[in-house]
Image (cartoon, rainbow, N blue to C red):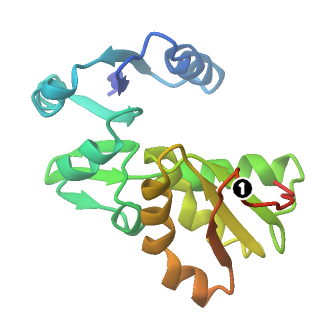
Amino acid sequence: MNQIKKFAVVGHPITHSKSPMIHRLFAEQFDLKLSYEKFDFFPDQFQYQLDKLQEQEYYGLNITLPFKKNAFLYCNQLSQKAKQTESVNTIIFKKNGIYGDTTDGIGLINDLLLNKVKLVSSNILLLGAGGAAQGVFLDLILKHPAKLAVYNRTLEKAEILVNKYQSEADKNEVSLAVFNAKNDNFNFDV
């Protein structure tokens, strides 16, 4: 049967999202039968609204701000990367559970490499320590930069992120740091 599969992106706010247009064009290009919508959910309604989408037989969802941690907690099956990052940006509703994965890191890495950005042995500054940073940090470490520094308005959040991945960085011989714009004088490649 050629049943149309339903997908959506979920966030708050979401009006700016171009995902429905991008997925419509993708579906047309490859002659796929799918629909793709966007939903703006209030944070206190996240789980309830996802349950409703599952009941309405949505096949999968993309998750954006501010719900990546909520999505991680919502899923009962997780990819290894989602477990490590404690972040989910992709949900698939399956008969036997709700599967969560994160593709932020590999997406960023692929875009950088496509644009011929050198990551190995580079000095990288990551701006922010929130959900998106959680989703990309490990993938950046696995590309073996010389140094990976994090800058965040809240110093404590940057420190938590660095401490969480310190052992992984040590295994990959990557120097991690919290960047302080007032005190640090450092040049970055990326």
Residue in view at x 25 percent, y 19 percent: 41
Residue in view at x 74 percent, y 46 percent: 111
Front residue of 182 and 70: 182
Residue in view at x 55 percent, y 67 percent: 138
**Percent position of residue 172, x then y:** 64, 85
Give the number of marks: 1
Q: Amino acid at mark 1?
A: Leu
Determine whether, in the image, residue 68 is placed left or right of residue 120: left
Determine whether, in the image, residue 89 is placed left or right of residue 40: right
Determine whether, in the image, residue 123 is placed left or right of residue 72: right
**Percent position of residue 58, x then y:** 25, 28
Tell me if residue 119 can be seen: yes
Location of residue 83 by image quarter? bottom left
Location of residue 70 by image quarter? top left
Front residue of 45 and 129: 129
**Percent position of residue 164, x then y:** 43, 72
Please name the residue that numbered disc 1 is placed on: 125
Answer above or below: position of 175 versus 54: below
**Percent position of residue 5, x then y:** 34, 26
Quadrant of the image containing the C terminus: bottom right
